Image (cartoon, grey):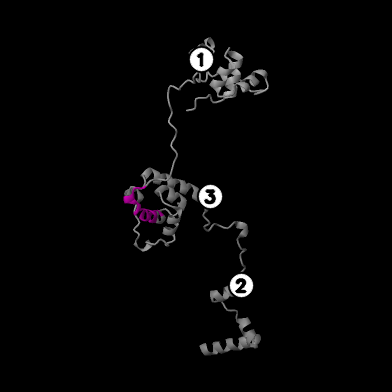
Amino acid sequence: MTDRPLMPIATAVWLIDNTSLTFDQIADFCGLHPLQVKGIADGDVGTGVRGIDPISNNQLTRDELEKAEQDENYRMKLARPKTLVADRPRKGPRYTPVSKRQNRPDAIAWMVRNHPEISDAQIAKLLGTTKSTSQSVRNRSHWNSANLTPQDPVGLGLCSQLELDAVVAKAAARRPRVAPDEGPTLEPVAAAPAPVEKDEEEEDRRDGKVDVDKVFASLGGGTMRRRDADEENEDEEN
C-alpha cells in the first residue's frame, strides 16, 4: 500500500480549506511540492477540483490531524486500514502434474468422441493443454494417434466433474446459435404441387374396361365388323 492518499490534489484542497496546516505539512502528506500546494491555495492549480475529506475516507485520523495543527514541524502519517484484503490471484494456465501429463491426449480423445461440440480452445483450457494438441488429436494427426485410448478426464484427475459439466453445458447452449439444425421440414400448402387429372382412358385401361368401338375403329372395320363378329359368336353358341 502506498504512503500517499488516493487523490492527493483533492485531499490537499480539503486540507487547505478546512485546516490550519502549513503548505509543507500538506505537501508532505499528499506527496506534492510545496509550490504546488501554494498554487492550489492561490487558485492557479486544481481549479474546479472538489475537496475530499481524508478523515471520512479513513486515510487520516482525527488525532493525527490535531497533532499536526498543534505542531507545524509534525508530519502526518497515512492511516492504515484495519483489515487488509489480499489481492485476487491472477488465473494462469492450469497446472497438470508431470505424472498425469502423458494422459492428456487420452482425455482429449475421450472428449472429442463423447462431446464433439466442445471447441479445441475449451478443451485446452479445461485440461491444461494447448489448442494445437487438441486439434491434432481431433484430426488424427497426433504422433501417437494409433495408441490413444479415450479415457474420462475426471477419472484421470485432470479436472473435476463440476468443471466438465460446466464446459459441456456451455458448449451445448452455444451450439444451436452456431450450427442450427437444418433437417427436413414440411412444405407449406401453397408450395404443394397441384393434383394431376387422370386420363379416363388410362383409368379404364387399369380397371380392365375396353371400349370395343374404339378397338375396331383402330383396325379399320368400324361398326360393321363388330356386328359380324357378334353374329359369328351367336352362331357358334347355337
The answer to which of marks 2 and 3 sits earlier in the sequence is 3
- In the image, the segment drawn in magenta is 96-111
Regarding residue 198, the answer to whether it shows in the image is yes
- CA gap between label 2 and label 3 equals 54 Å
Residue 66 screen position, x and y as percent: 51, 11
Q: Which residue is mark 2?
A: 200
Q: Which residue shows up at 40% across the image and 44% down it?
A: 163
**Up/down of 57 relative to 132, above or below:** above
Sort mark 3 into few (<14), some (14-19) or many (20+) by Cα contacts within 10 Å. few
Q: Amino acid at mark 2?
A: Glu
On screen, 78 above or below 118? above
Which one is closest to the eye, mark 1 or mark 3?
1
Verify CB contact (< 8 Å) between mark 2 and mark 3. no
Side of 109 where 57 appears, left or right: right
Residue behind mark 3? 177
Foreground pick, 146 / 111: 146
Give the residue drawn at x 60%, y 61%: 192
Distance in Å between CA atoms under marks 1 and 2:
120 Å
Instruction: Tell us which disc is closer to us: 2 or 3.
Output: 3
Give 121 or 90, whichever is nearer the viewer.
Answer: 90
Q: x%, y% of residue 124? A: 43, 50
Tell me how far mark 1 sits from mark 3, CA to CA: 67 Å
Question: Can residue 100 be found in the magenta stretch?
Answer: yes
Q: Say which element carries label 2.
A: helix
